[in-house]
Amino acid sequence: MFLDETKIFLTSGSGGDGIVHFRREKYVPRGGPDGGNGGKGGDVILVVDPRLNTLSNFRRKRHYHAGDASSGGGNNKTGRSGEDLEILVPPGTLVRDATSGALLGDLVDHDQRLVVCHGGRAGKGNACYATSRNQTPHMAEKGEPGEEKTLLLELRLIADVGIVGVPNAGKSTLLAAVTNAKPKIAEYPFTTLQPNLGVADLDELTSLILADIPGLIEGAHKGTGLGFAFLRHIERTRVLIHVIDGSSENPIADFSQVNAEMALFSSSIAQKPQIVAINKLDLPDVEDRLSALTEMISERGYESFPISAMAHRGLRELLWSAHERLSQLEPQPIVEDTLPVYGFEDETIPFEISREPDGAWRVSGEEVERAAAMTYWEFDEAIARFQQLLVHLGVEDALREAGITSGETVRVSDYELEWLT
């Protein structure tokens, strides 16, 4: 099964907790704090594997979790870090944040790596908080929770040459004739339901990677037929071989229709070099009208080659011409005509204050909620440190401006605090 879009759910590993611990060795009456730090949580990493050409591995498994870290120990022992989780993806994978739509990465190179969820930071043990004024700190820090993200993966096949044309023009037959690919071939339209890749060897040192794009019909840029799902794969190619059925009722109309659909989908596709292959030369009717077709295509500014994919006629000339066009081009990045741009324009608001139905105040925000999760609420010193953070972030002033009164409840994540003036 071919899959070129999928949604996956990721969670990085949580950091290990730091601990409160003191040396208890015989004859060391004031040994001091020796609580160790926790380990770092495991990252979630996407890694390009050139052996893959589909996202179908994600069809059955969509939830992934990196390894959690372990807590620290006495004698300043650091906890074990969580294991990183590497997820293999095919070359040509675009990675987006499903919530914001931001483009996180474009994975195209062999063994390229992208950390999409960072593991939680390690919590500090009480040995880290010892000072000359506080030599026995009764506080530590819990490990930072792991990140949770929902990602959209979109595959755009990477090929030197894209083979396009209307359904049943002979694209799959051409790919099968010049490569070892074995696409499904039949006498009815829409035989090809997924893109196919193949490698054509021109000589011992020269090869081309070709992609057979499923048939495009009128309205493909709006989703009609199969076009909308697979037009994106053409953007990765640098040269197009446009196969027209020389035996169809109006080959030039078919040719113009496909070009129009590609241009409506993306302006960058319309600018790609095209070579026209007039297919089915083995049929007598096509040979009779070949001169007229060649002239009409030439008038539109395109070079054409008469071929018979079935009889293997004219194929080497076609491929060498495509290679010549390819060698004249510089690699070009994808032009994101219809996709969101990188990042965000506005700065993230650090926190928000709202009123809940029962009258309690709710403080929400990534930084303040993370700090609450990393606080040891059973230690007074840790609670005092959390209150200092609320002052530093401006939460305390904001609550006063909102009209909070003594004795009211303030909720941060799953924790409840009482406001005292």
Image (cartoon, rainbow, N blue to C red):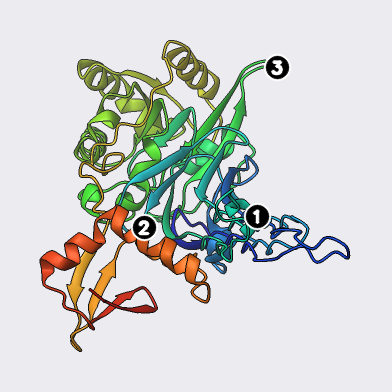
Vertically, is 82 above or below 338? Answer: below
Categorize mark 3 by other alpha carbons within 10 Å: few (<14), some (14-19), many (20+). few
Of helix, strand and loop, which one carries label 1? Answer: helix
Q: Could you tell me which quadrant the C terminus lies in?
A: bottom left
Percent across and percent down for residue 133 are 55, 52
Q: Which residue is drawn at 27% across and 29% down?
A: 268
- Disc 1 residue type (three-letter): Ala
Quote the CA–CA distance across marks 3 and 2: 67 Å
Is label 3 in a helix, a strand or a loop? loop
Q: Position of residue 61 (x, y in %)?
A: 57, 67
Residue 370: tell me if it is visible: no
State the residue in front, 282 or 313: 313
Instruction: Give the quarter of the image for residue 247.
Output: top left
Q: How far apart, in angstroms, are the residues tagged by discs 1 and 2?
A: 21 Å
The residue under the point 72% across, 64% down is 22
Q: In this view, does 158 lie above or below 221?
A: above
**Quadrant of the image containing the N terminus:** bottom right
- Left/right placement of residue 98 relative to residue 25 reads left
Pointer 3 or 2: first along the chain: 3
On residue 127, the disc is 1
How far from the left and from the top, in percent, is residue 371? 43, 62
SS at mark 2 in the image: helix
Res 290 label: none
Residue receiving disc 3? 204
Tell me the number on the disc at residue 389: 2
Q: What residue type is labelled 3?
A: Glu
- Left or right relative to 127: residue 319: left
Which amino acid, mark 2? Leu
